Amino acid sequence: MSVPAVAVAQTVPFADLGRLHHDVSGALERAWREALATSSFIGGERVERFEREWARYCGVGHAVGVANGTDAIELTLRALGIGPGDEVLVPANTFIATAEAVVLAGAEPRFVDVDRRTLLVTQDVIRGAISPRTAAVIAVALYGNMPAMDEIRSLADARGLALIEDAAQAHGSTWRGARAGSFGVAGCFSFYPGKNLGALGDGGAVVTNDAALAERIRLLANHGRPGGSHFHHEVVGRNSRLDALQAALLSAKLQMLDGWNEARRDAVRLYRALLDPELSPLVYVEPESVSTHHLNVVRVRNRHRVRAELAQFGIETGVHYPIPCNRHDPYRGYAPGPLPVVERAADEILSLPLFPHITDQQIEYVCSCLNAAVGKRNGDGN
């Protein structure tokens, strides 16, 4: 198999965390040395500082650091009193953690379909899925793209439903100028290392404008202990805390986030200019949404073959996600009917290399190889 004539053979990784961490290596090393010097590893000033910074960045009043993004959703549901007997609407094309958190809280996920262009949940989809047992809606900002959050919020408010944002892929994304995490009763974030704002391990946070909800989540996440108490436990809680070291590292990386996100947007603009929209269209982003492009997703026919061919060209790709939530064995039965958009998209979506330091030359190479691979498959009728 030969490289397309207009391309120069090279290797393109799916992501490059090494280049990203090089940008903040000095700050990361200082944070590590300070943690060792003070032996302050759990809670304390570094966690409180990051919580203030993250709340301010998201445009809300409060942030609570937790152990990971899954816990962020589960703890929010528990703090809202959502559990056995309740139903939570969840789009089926999300990482399994969204639904997993619902089950762990004791409630049932009700999987819904999505818009065919954006692959995001919509007001109309939600309206058609509401049942007498529906207590909450989890609106997932997928790939860094936000749903029409003002419309979804209006519907949730009108129906008395709690709106929770799964913003694990949307650090800094906006809808009509307001940041992810600022629309629902709470926004839930993951700081998994590969996220746009990633820790050097697991981490997560809940952001909210509801002070009482923030304190309830903090209580549940710290063994049911109220603030300032060590041996008094008001409720049955759990251990889900953001480590002080990770908080310090996140504070250092937060200073770079907007620049990194803009670099991602520049890269996607070049992808859009070079890819053939008829053969491999990028997932549509509504003009009201400023995406942070956590993932760069196209839709192709014969994905398995195309992906294998790109791998032979030295191009790493991913699939997010090849199996809809409702098709995993533990979650079968939680969908009220067929989900045609989600089912079809699961067979077509392909995530292309994208990271802040990707070069124009790398993007040109990926686009040249993908256009050739998809065009050939189209031409030979496969």
Image (cartoon, helix red, strand yellow):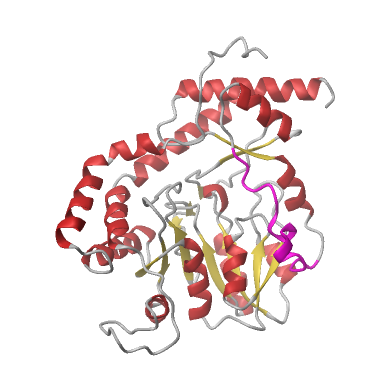
Corner quadrant of residue 212: bottom left
| Residue 41 drawn in magenta | no
Drawn side of residue 186 relative to residue 312, left or right: left
Quarter of the image that includes the C terminus = top right
Most distant residue in the left direction: 37
- Quadrant location of the N terminus in the rendered image: top right
Q: How many marks?
A: 0
Q: Which segment did they paint magenta?
A: 318-336
Residue under the image location 63 percent in, 83 percent down: 84
Q: Is residue 3 above or below residue 110?
A: above
Residue extending farthest to the right is: 381
Q: Is residue 199 visible?
A: yes
Quadrant in the rendering for residue 202 = bottom left
Residue 206, percent across and down? 42, 67
- Residue 135 position within the rendered picture, expressed as x and y whole percent measured from the top left: 62, 78
Q: Is residue 151 visible from the viewing direction of this image?
A: no
Q: Nearer the viewer, residue 357 or 159?
A: 357
Magenta part, dominant SS: loop
Instruction: Give the camera-side residue of 284 and 192.
Output: 192
Look at 69% across and 23% down and name the residue there. Answer: 373
The quarter holding residue 63 reads bottom left
Spot the residue most to the top.
5
- Whole-percent x, y for residue 180 in the image: 46, 58
Residue in the picture at 43% in, 35% down? 16
Q: Position of residue 115 (x, y in %)?
A: 69, 53
Q: Is residue 235 above or below residue 23?
A: below
Relative to 284, is 22 on the left or the right?
left
Asked if residue 339 is positioned above or below residue 208 in the image, the reply reads above
Is residue 244 found left or right of 341 in the rendered image?
left
